[in-house]
Image (spheres, helix red, strand yellow):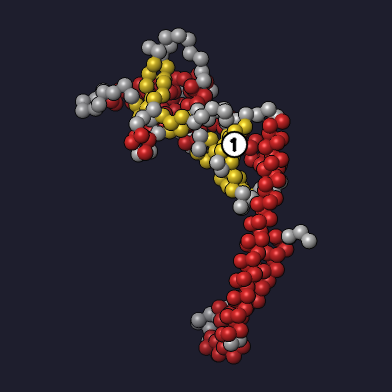
Amino acid sequence: MSFDEKAQMKALQKEILKIEQVFSAFTKIKSNDADALDKFNKGLKKLPPGQIIGTAVEELREKITSFIQQSQQTRMESFGRIEAEFIRNTRKQHKSVREQARGWRIGPLEVEMDREQSRVRFLYNREVLLPWQSVFCKEDIEKSELKALDMLGKSLLPEPTLIKTCWETYQNLKILSNRPGANHSELVPIDAFYRELRAQLVRTQLETKKPDSKLNYIEMPRWAFLYNLDCYRTIRFPDQTPRLGFQAGSQMEVSKGMGFVLNGLDALEDYKTFCYVIAVGS
């Protein structure tokens, strides 16, 4: 006989409710009722001995423990078949696929698998796009994959806007670095670049709109920022055209959280961590 998780859970909930009802005679009493004390006394007379309640609770504990273990085992076995079917179908579609320690990289996405709980979540450059979602069939993963890809597509700035905004962002930060007391470095920390890019997008829109206008580019989660940078890095610039490059930092800088993971557009390519933005080609 196959294991029916929902039916088993409902049966356990009924047993839990029976124990709960033993004490409901007390919990339903309002302290400001005139006969509250009398109701407490009546409830006390109906209360089973502690040994009976204790035994019932311990038996229920064993049943719940067994239920959880069996559910996890069943989910793992079922999820294994679903995962294999999903990957097999993905490969048939000639998508780039690469196995990871906790899941797969497929195209620009990373699919992280929680096999014990039969859940998946989608990431881009190790940043969460879609949080954990339960999986009951291959189609559940496929729907989430399409949703994640759609989110990436909608987050991408038009190429002219992306080029213009990235360059202006770098120039803004360079002006700040040339102030008295600044370090005058050509390198701009990528975390500062992220903050300034968002601000520059707002400024650019307000240049051509009324101050109370609704703006198009306000939200930019970290995954969206990284996706836009990766797409920027694929743009073919004419020779000698000023553009931005990205540089790695030291291990200490990366350990302090300065590094941003890029290079996630293709599952067959390795992730790369960068700490700085710099102008090149000029």
- Give coordinates of residue 253: x percent, y percent: 34, 34
Residue 216 seen anywhere in this rendered image of the structure: no
Number of callouts: 1
Residue located 67% across and 37% down the image: 87
Q: Is residue 102 above or below residue 59?
A: above
Residue located 68% across and 34% down the image: 90
Residue located 65% across and 69% down the image: 63
Give the image quarter of residue 28. Answer: bottom right
- Relative depth, front residue between 25 and 126: 126
- Give coordinates of residue 35: x percent, y percent: 55, 88
- Give coordinates of residue 215: x percent, y percent: 49, 32
- Relative depth, front residue between 33 and 256: 256
Would you name the residue on which mark 1 appears?
A: 99
Q: Residue furthest top?
A: 239
Q: Residue furthest right?
A: 1
Q: Amino acid at mark 1?
A: Glu
- Give coordinates of residue 146: x percent, y percent: 65, 36
Residue 128 seen anywhere in this rendered image of the structure: yes
Within 10 angstroms of label 1, few (less than 14), some, or many (20 or more) residues? some
Q: Say what secondary structure mark 1 lies in.
A: strand
Looking at the rendering, in which quadrant would you find the N terminus?
bottom right
Give the image quarter of residue 26. Answer: bottom right
Looking at the rendering, in which quadrant would you find the C terminus?
top left
Q: Is residue 113 above or below residue 153?
A: below
Q: Is residue 27 above or below residue 176?
A: below
- Relative depth, front residue between 140 and 180: 140
Residue 276 relative to residue 269: left or right: left
Residue 4 relative to residue 32: left or right: right
